[in-house]
Each structure stands twice: as C-alpha cells, then as structure tokens.
Image: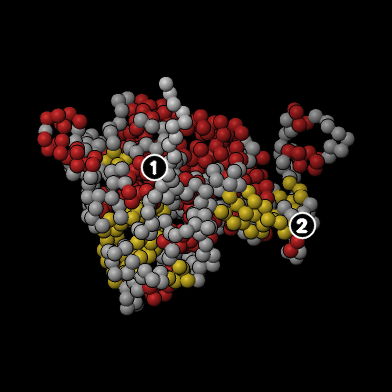
Amino acid sequence: MTDEKTRDADTIDLWVAGTEEPQFSPTEYSPTDEGSQEIGAEETQHRLDEQFGRVVSDDYVFDDDALDDERMIVNMGPQHPSTHGVLRLQIELEGEIIRRTKPVIGYLHTGMEKTAEQLTFSQGPTNVTRMDYLAPLHGELAYSLAVERLLDVEVPPRAAAIRVLLTELNRVSSHLVALATNGMDVGALSMMIYGFRERESILAFFEKTTGLRMNHNFIRPGGVAADLPPGWKDDVAAILDDLPGRLAQYDDLLKENPIWTSRTRGVGVITADEATAYGITGPALRASGVDWDLRKAFPYSGIDQYEFDVPVGERGDVYDRYRVRVDEIHESLKIVSQVMDTIPKGDYRIDDRKITPPPRARIDESMEALIHHFKLFTEGFKVPAGETYVAVESPRGELGCYMASDGGARPYRMHTRAPSFANLQALPIAMADSLMADTIATIASMDPVMGDVDR
Amino acid sequence: MTDHATIIDDLVGGFDSAELEDSHGQHVVRLSPAEWKSFAEAAKEAGFEVCVDVTAVDWMRQKAERFEIVANLLSMRHRLRLRMIAPVGRVDPTIDSLVPVWPGANYAEREAYDMFGIVFDGHPDLTRILMPDDWDGHPLRKDFGVGGVPVQFKASHQVE
C-alpha cells in the first residue's frame, strides 16, 4: 500500500501533521448530551472533534531513513484473541508503522489431506467438514461434487436444491460471524452479541435438519443424507422474516457510525491488481472491485436457475469488505427464498445402490439391499481412475477440491484449495505501511478460519 | 470473446511437449518440467491471470516419474480454467517456481515443498509452512506412514 492511498482525503479522515488541515463543519454533527458537557477549560472545537473521532491527528511523520535500530520486530500470536485462532504474525515496526509482516501458520495443522487418503469416499465428508468449521457445508459440497464428477453421476434436482438451500444459509451464518468478530475486534462489542444471536437461529435449523450444529456430514457423494425435516418451510420462513430487519439494525449501528468508519475506511487496502496476482477470492476480491463469483462464472448444483446479484465494492478497504458481506447476506436470503418456493419433489439422493445406501426398511426384506448396505459400509464404493478439480464459492472464496483416484475405494489424493490459506498471502500487502492499530481490523476483514488455513 | 477451444489450442500449439487432455470436461495440459515456466508465462499472456493452486500427487511405484505437479489456472476474462500437470522424478524432484509469474503461487508451492519435498527453483522463500521447521520427512508422500502416538495404559486407577 502506498502512502498516497492512506492520505486520500476521500477515503479517510486522517490528518497527518504537517499537511493542510482538513475543514470540518461543526454543524454537521450534533454533540450528545454527555459529550456536550464542559470537561475542561481547554475544550476547543478541535479538541472536541478529536474526542468524537471526527479527526485523527497524529504526531508521527513518515520517515523513510529510519535507522536499523529503530526497527522492532513484534510477535503477535499464536495465542491472541484477535487473530481468529492460532495465526501468528511477525511484524516489523518502525515506530507505530508496520513495514513488513510475515504470517506464520501451521499451528492447527492436523494432516487432514493425509487422513482423507485413509477414509473411503463415503467417509470423506466427515473429514472435509472439519476444515472450514464456519462453512462446513461448502467443504462437503466441494468434496461431493468432485467425487460425483469422477463417477460421472448427476444428483436429482431436489438434492441439488437442498444443497443450495443449506450452503446459502451457511453463507449467511458464516458472514454473520465475520461481521460479529470484525465488530468486536474494533470495539463494537454489541455487534458481536447480535451477530452470534442471529447465527443461532440458522444453526438451530441446521441442527434440526442435519442433527448437528456444525460438522454436519450432511452433503454426501450422491446427494444429501436425509430429506428436509417436516415443517422446515416454517423455520426457513422465520429466518427470512427475521433477518432483514436485524440487518437494518446493524446498518443503523455501523454503516455511518463515525468511529466505525474512521477505523475501517481506507484501512487495509488491497487493489484489484494485487488481489488477482495473489489469488485472492471471495468477498475480499469483490471488495476490490472485481466482479467475480463462482456461482455466476462456473455455476454448480443448479445455482444458475436462481436470481441474485453479486455485490461489488470499490476501494478494497476494510469498510468495503464489510459492506460486501452485508450485501451478500441479502443476496443469499434471496436465493434461499427462491429455493423455498421452487424446490422440486423427488429423491434426495441418486437411486444407485452402488453409491447410496438402501432405505433401512428394505434391508429386512431384500438380500440385495443387505449386500449393498454391507458393501457400502465396509469396503465403500469404487471410483474410476482419474483426476478432477471442482470449486465452489465458499463464504471466504474459492474452495476447491482436487481429487485423484486410482480406481480404489479411497481417494488416492485429495487436496483442498483453501480460500483462507490463499487470502492470508494478501495480509502483508494490506498491512504494509499502515498503523499498528489497524492490524486487527485488517485481519478481521480477511476473515481467515485457521482450520481452513492449516487443515 | 474468443472461443475457449481457440484460446487453449493457440496456447498449447506453441509447445512441443504439451499434450492437451480432456479430464471429465476440464482442460488439462501435460507438460515436460523443462517447459513448465515458459508455458506458465505464455498462459499468463493468453489471459490466465490467476494461479489458483499448486499441488502435487505422489504416484509411488505406479508411474515412471514419481511425482506429478499440478497447477490450476483461472482466466476471469475468458471464464476458463486450465490445469497444468508435469511429472518430476524421485531422485531430484525439482521444478521451476511459478512465483515470478504469479506471486499467489507462493504459499501453495511452500505447502507442496513441505508435504512432498518438491523443490521449486526460484522460489523466494522455500521453507516449511505447515509442519514444524525441524520436522523430518514429507508427510504426504506415500512412503510416510500414518503412524500415531502410542497411548500408555496404566492400571493405576482401578474402580472397585
């Protein structure tokens, strides 16, 4: 990031000492009762502005000729509440300005790609669902789509619709956590409580549908594990009724809040060119002004039959990434409501007993059903030799699954292209030459999930 | 917008070792490791502005050359994906780094080095990324055992 960007008067209310002082109109803001009380004799207008956060005046100057002994390396994490898990940063500071950053990762590495080689194709989703634990259904979807592509099978329309319904709800719940933690990290504690409260209603629906709040193992090769529970439409309708009003409340809370905007506007800027060069995807890419969404570009699971827009930001700063996430929640709710209205009747998994187990009742009646059941749950099904790469748009970006099969019942190689892993590469660029105090806001806006980074 | 097949054919045509394959409807180019980087540069020229992922597969005792390096490319302009695959041998698993072409390949190549011991020539910082720095071996190789930590059972706590 260049100095020019930070000093752009349009994007940030930061007044650097020695430059022309910005003009403020006192009539624009009306002081609250508490703030308007006289505190001391030195209560000048400028002093008030500082206290209100309308103007940030710092006495540091950008000095490129700093001596080596003025540079300091600060270690942040891995045990740090604001790094969203076990992210460790080595930050080289010059005074209060970050010059270089090096993310150190791997503290949560559990060898899940190695584990995937030991699990059959039907056991695989239990593994991938634990990678990005805030968006487990997207991981399962990418895995299942990869297996289905190697098998050359197509799931029934109802299964595809259920998958879209659940993954879009999952996107909403994941973005709510992103908003909540982003709010908490810059001091908006109420946002954290609100975000987690609304997420709870979605997790309750997931629990009713899949049996678990997280790590569902619901989307499986060949379809989904079960049909939607009775009364699911009421639950989804309640979520659809409730959320837009709540989102409007968050906008009241944050959208034009001077503290929030001054902490996020012009902070952690990633330009469109940087984003594409570093393989950044998801909301972070769209906030930089690149109109790119895999749901539009390479539609999966029949998502192209639903109408939705792709929100795009302009400046690529923390504020735009926050706005893109809020807008994406609205778009996801649009998709969910369309799925609810148009969901087709039929099977929720393919009717191929070599891939999906027979219904429980059939096992008592049919020898073949018993054999199929036994074979599926001991040996698993075999997948023809080949290799493929399938990507879905997870809340964090392109979640890809590269799968190579040698014709056996287990993946020969399963590699997950984790969006958080790639997005983390942009952190040093977004943070270079910015203030130490902006670190937390920048990390939070990239929304890394360490389970996804380290796998 | 030019036709997808034309873009791929124009790109692949300029390289002797490049073989175009259709893998379940996806474009795959198999290359010799010598042409790995020059192909990547040509691909970037042709509009593949993002290197989504670099990884490796260990085909121990199944293929003549033990490792396959896989790079997934993406062209946002043409809405097109292309996968580059090059084999490297067991004795000296070295291939040119793609970081000078796409900086985003950095972490992915470090991961492939960490997990398979593939050396990426020209990588700015080829160190372990997920495993501890003093780790012995490369876990995703097929001859690296799954292993486990032995659990010690004691009879110290007995319930009557």
- Kindly identify which numbered label has been placed on residue A448: none
Residue lying furthest top in this view?
B160
Which residue, given by chain and number where applicable, does mark 2 sit on?
A61
Closest to the observer, A234 or B25: B25
Above or below B20: residue B155: above
Query: Whole-percent x and y of residue A61?
Result: 76, 57
Dividing the picture into quadrants, the one containing residue B49 is bottom left
**Mark sitting earlier along the chain (2/1):** 2
Above or below B93: residue A402: above
Give the amino acid type for the residue marked by disc 1 in the picture.
Thr
Query: Whole-percent x and y of residue B109?
Result: 46, 62
- A331 relative to A107 in the view: left or right: left
Query: Whole-percent x and y of residue B90?
Result: 37, 69
Is residue A141 visible from the viewing direction of this image? yes
SS under mark 1: loop
Dividing the picture into quadrants, the one containing residue B83 is bottom left
| Quadrant of the frame with the N terminus of chain A | bottom right
Closest to the observer, A32 or A182: A182
Above or below A230: residue B56: below
- A235 relative to A319 in the view: left or right: left
Query: Whole-percent x and y of residue B111?
Result: 46, 58
- A169 relative to A39 in the view: left or right: left
Identify which residue is drawn at 11% across, 35% down.
A367
Above or below B11: residue A453: above
Identify which residue is drawn at 74% across, 55% down.
A95
Q: Report the chain holding disc 2.
A: A
Is residue A312 visible from the viewing direction of this image? no
Closest to the observer, A138 or A57: A138
Which residue, given by chain and number where applicable, does mark 1 sit on?
A129
Closest to the observer, A349 or A360: A360
Q: Report the chain holding disc 1.
A: A
Give the amino acid type for the residue marked by disc 2 in the picture.
Val
